Structure formats: structure tokens, C-alpha cells
Image: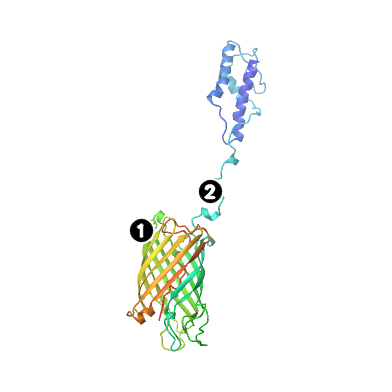
């Protein structure tokens, strides 16, 4: 009886470990405390048997008795049992199922409940699109070049603007492309000229700016401190200025910056005109108009709350009305998607002080709300949010016009 009990327990233990290996990723191995009872029972049996003998266990027998010839040691018993077919045991091993292990490519839990792009540094073009609406007031060449015999005074223009700007990838390159446009309506009550079929004094001035080009943002956290961008700006004006003319002008605009640290960037930006417009002035002798050539230096600063400002000062080409300028751009996030923006430009003319100089001053100011579709309104460094366009769409502050 004791032999049968011992063999049964030992066979059950071997069945657990042997059968378990076939089905478990992490097989159960008995601890020393769990092995001690079996070791004690087997040793005790061997000692109590004394001179008694056990029958050898043959492949087909599986039995032993006190009448069997020859003594058999405990190691021989264990080896013989291991050679026999091991019956299935109802005792299952303890292991962690593979189905409960997380997949190797699993995303962090924080990303599982938010849009997929939030786990990506850049995202698609939709998540890098900004739209805005605001007000703008400006004074340009169209507001002081007076039609002869028609003007009653000098003026400026004020109205509302809306637009979009988006950035999109070019394969795996760090260089990206941007495309944007604005539409503005100004002077809802017309302009300060005598009623005339030529100058349409009561018509609303409308403007469209298109901007497209290439750019690369810096990544100051990874010690990539250089940012740059080159864009083409196109301007269309309908009923533009006191002449109520149709305007089509173009320029090239570029920027090159260096991130000094995570909060500050310095650099240069400028423009160069492309062609002239000869169709604006229907009478008189004013020269054709064009975009001013600019060369500016700037300083951009990023704040702890995620907003930024850019201050710049620069010179204009000697052939233009302007002599020098200064300006500022700012953006303050109100949430992860909504921001307050503001722009300001002041252009000092090259003419002497007095009536002429006072009238040739140009300026632009705009303020409004910007909405980022990809929740990228907050920037943690001066490099800005990856994927967003680097250069703003042109406006009356960056696209200056001279005769």
C-alpha cells in the first residue's frame, strides 16, 4: 500500500511537470517546500524496506512486490517510472496565458483613448491646418495715390478677413510644403472720391492672398536649431484703393532662423518683387506699382503658456516709397485648439516730414481668432508644433506695395 501511494504521488508530480511543458509558456516548477514531502516519503520507504527487495519494473508490467528478485534503489525506481507512459493528470500547471500579454507594438494607454495622430509627432495635413477670422485695417499705396480731380481727401481701409494655412509632408523628408489663402473685404461704404463711373466710389474692395512653398522647422530639443522657408505670394485686388483698380502682383518671401535655446530664435526674413502692374491707373501719370523689396532681422520668443511673439525691424529698397519698417506678430493660445492672434506693421517713408511724408506712411494692424484642427495651438518650444506651416499667409503687412 505504501509503495502504491508513493508511486502514485511521484507519477502525479512527473505528469504535472511533463505534461505541463507541452501546453505552458511558463511551466510550473515545484519549490523546495513542495518537494520535501515526496523526498521524505521516498527516503523513508527505502530505509524501512531494509533488505526487502522490489521487482524491476519492466516496460509492460508497471507492478512491483516484496517477492520480486533483487533490491531496487530509489533512483532506479524514478528512472523506471520515467520510462513508462505518463498518464494525463487532472492537475493543471500554473502559468500566465499568452493571450493576456500585451502585443509588442501596443501603444501607451494614454494614446488609446485619443485620436491616432496624437501619438505621432506630425500627423496628416488635416491636423496641420489652421483657419481664422479677424479684423484688419491698413494703409497702402492705393490709399494715398490720388486720382487727379477726383479725390476729396486721403483715407485708409478697414474690413474683415478669413483664411486658412496648412502644412503637408513630402514623403519621409523633414522638408515639408505649405499652402494657404486669405480673403478680405474692405471699405463697405466705398471710398473718398467723387461719384464717377470710372472709380466706383461705392464699391467694396476685395482682396485675395495666396501663399505656397517649402519649409523646414527646427527641432531644438533634438539639437536641430535651423529653420527655413521659401514661399511664393500672389496678390489679387478688386476695386483696390482710391482708383478702384484691378491689381495682380507677386513676390518671393523667405526666412532663415536659428534657435538659440528652447525659448528664443533669431534670424532674417525678406521679400523680392516679381513683376509690376501697369493696369491700375487709368488716367494721370503715376508709375506702375509693385511689391517692395524687404530685408529684416527678427527675434522670436516662446512663452511658458505656449504662446509666442516675433519682433522685427528692417530696411526697404531705395526705389520704394518706404525707407525702413518695424513690426510684430503674436499668438496666445486660449485652449489646445483656439488662439488669439495679432499683427502690426509700420513703414516709415523716405520722403521728408510734412504733408507728403505723412500721407506716404503705410501701416497694417489685424487681430482675430485662429483655430487649429489638430489641437496644436500650444507650442512648448520656439520650434513650434511639428507639421504646422512655418510662414504665415501674406497680408497687407508682409506684402507692401509701392509705385
Question: Is 135 above or below relative to 239?
Answer: above
Q: Could you give the CA–CA distance between mark 2 and mark 1, rounded to whole angstroms?
A: 32 Å
Q: Position of residue 206 (x, y in %)?
A: 51, 77
Q: Position of residue 175 (x, y in %)?
A: 45, 62
Q: Pointer 2: what residue?
A: 110
Q: Pointer 1: what residue?
A: 260
Labelled pair 2, 1 in contact (Cβ < 8 Å): no
Q: Residues within 10 Å of mark 1 (few under 14, many from 20)?
A: few
Q: Which quadrant is home to the C terminus? A: bottom left
**Foreground of the two, 327 or 53:** 327
* Chosen colour scheme: rainbow
Residue 32 seen from this side? yes
Q: Which quadrant is home to the N terminus? A: top right
Q: Secondary structure at mark 1?
A: loop
Identify which residue is drawn at 43% across, 64% down: 330
Q: Quadrant of residue 103?
A: top right
Q: Position of residue 5 (x, y in %)?
A: 64, 19
Identify which residue is drawn at 42% across, 79% down: 141
Identify which residue is drawn at 38% across, 80% down: 359
Q: Secondary structure at mark 2?
A: helix
Q: Quadrant of residue 33?
A: top right
Side of 3 relative to 387 (left or right): right
Amino acid at each position: 500500500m505504501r509503495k502504491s501511494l508513493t508511486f502514485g504521488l511521484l507519477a502525479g508530480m512527473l505528469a504535472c511537470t511533463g505534461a505541463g511543458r507541452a501546453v505552458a509558456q511558463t511551466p510550473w516548477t515545484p519549490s523546495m517546500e513542495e518537494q520535501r514531502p515526496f523526498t521524505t516519503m521516498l527516503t523513508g520507504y527505502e530505509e524501512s524496506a531494509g533488505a526487502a527487495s522490489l521487482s524491476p519494473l519492466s516496460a509492460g508490467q508497471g507492478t512491483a512486490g516484496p517477492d520480486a528478485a533483487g533490491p531496487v534503489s530509489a533512483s532506479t525506481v524514478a528512472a523506471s517510472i520515467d520510462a513508462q507512459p505518463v498518464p494525463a493528470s487532472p492537475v493543471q500547471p500554473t502559468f500566465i496565458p499568452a493571450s493576456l500579454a500585451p502585443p509588442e507594438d501596443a501603444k501607451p494607454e494614454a494614446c488609446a483613448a485619443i485620436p491616432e495622430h496624437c501619438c505621432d509627432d506630425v500627423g496628416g495635413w488635416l491636423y496641420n491646418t489652421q483657419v481664422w477670422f479677424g479684423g484688419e485695417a491698413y494703409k497702402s499705396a492705393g490709399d494715398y495715390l490720388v486720382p487727379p480731380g477726383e479725390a476729396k481727401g486721403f483715407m485708409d481701409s478697414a474690413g474683415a478677413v478669413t483664411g486658412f494655412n496648412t502644412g503637408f509632408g513630402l514623403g519621409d523628408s523633414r522638408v515639408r510644403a505649405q499652402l494657404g489663402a486669405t480673403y478680405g473685404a474692405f471699405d463697405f461704404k466705398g471710398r473718398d472720391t467723387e461719384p464717377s463711373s470710372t472709380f466706383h466710389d461705392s464699391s467694396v474692395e476685395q482682396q485675395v492672398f495666396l501663399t505656397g512653398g517649402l519649409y523646414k522647422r527646427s527641432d531644438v530639443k533634438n539639437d536641430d536649431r535651423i529653420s527655413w522657408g521659401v514661399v511664393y505670394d500672389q496678390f489679387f485686388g478688386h476695386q483696390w484703393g482710391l482708383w478702384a483698380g484691378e491689381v495682380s502682383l507677386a513676390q518671393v518671401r523667405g526666412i532663415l532662423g536659428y534657435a538659440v535655446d528652447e525659448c528664443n530664435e533669431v534670424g532674417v526674413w525678406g521679400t523680392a518683387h516679381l513683376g509690376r502692374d501697369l493696369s491700375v491707373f487709368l488716367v494721370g501719370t503715376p508709375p506702375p506699382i509693385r511689391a517692395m523689396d524687404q530685408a529684416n532681422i527678427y527675434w522670436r520668443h516662446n512663452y511658458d503658456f505656449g504662446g509666442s511673439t516675433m519682433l522685427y525691424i528692417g530696411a526697404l529698397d531705395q526705389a520704394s516709397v518706404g525707407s525702413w519698417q518695424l513690426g510684430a506678430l503674436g499668438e496666445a493660445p486660449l485652449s489646445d485648439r483656439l488662439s488669439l492672434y495679432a499683427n502690426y506693421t509700420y513703414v516709415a517713408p523716405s520722403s521728408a516730414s510734412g504733408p507728403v511724408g505723412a500721407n506716404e506712411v503705410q501701416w497694417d494692424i489685424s487681430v482675430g481668432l485662429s483655430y487649429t484642427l489638430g489641437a496644436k495651438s500650444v507650442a512648448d518650444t520656439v520650434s513650434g508644433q511639428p507639421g504646422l506651416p512655418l510662414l504665415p499667409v501674406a497680408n497687407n503687412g508682409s506684402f507692401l506695395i509701392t509705385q
